[in-house]
Amino acid sequence: MPVYTLEDAVTLAQWDVICSYEELQEMLARDPNISQTLSTPKIIGGRMGNKDTKVPDGFKDLQKRIKAGSGRGNTVNV
């Protein structure tokens, strides 16, 4: 489900809601003081692209076995 940021025009309070787009439209129709605001996407960070993370010990060995079994003319670089 997507996360939407809403704002109350009277109190200027902002909060996030997790709901479907149809439910969001119902909320906005019920209360004219509430509006959807723009915000940055909620991104969950993973391990990709982090240079400080270590690769498990057996990973290089696994790559070598994959390269050895991939056949002639492969483009796997180890």
Image: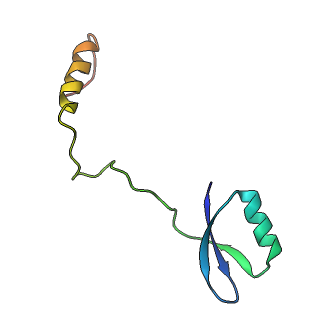
Where, by quadrant of the figure, is residue 65 drawn? top left
The C terminus is located in which quarter?
A: top left
- In the picture, which quadrant includes the N terminus? bottom right
The image quarter containing residue 15 is bottom right
Q: How is the image coloured?
A: rainbow
Residue 51 location (% of width, % of height): 23, 51
In this rendering, position of residue 23 left or right of residue 42: right
Q: How many numbered circles are shown?
A: 0
Instruction: Give percent across and percent down for residue 30.
Output: 82, 73
Residue at x 23%, y 49% (from the top left corner): 53
Relative placement, left or right, of 42 versus 57 is: right
22 and 77: which is toward the camera: 22
| In the rendered image, the vertical position of residue 63 relative to residue 71, given as above or below | below
Residue reaching furthest to the right = 30
**Whole-percent x and y of residue 71?**
28, 11
Residue visible at 26% across and 10% down?
72
Q: Nearer the viewer, residue 22 or 74?
A: 22
Which of the two residues, 4 or 38, is positioned nearer the viewer here? 4
Q: Is residue 61 left or right of residue 26?
A: left
Quarter of the image holding residue 59?
A: top left
Which residue appears at 75% of the width and 61% of the height? 23
Q: Is residue 72 above or below residue 77?
A: above
Instruction: Tell me if 12 is positioned left or right of 43 in this view.
Output: right
Q: Residue at x 28, y 17 (%)?
A: 74
Query: Residue lying farthest top?
Result: 72
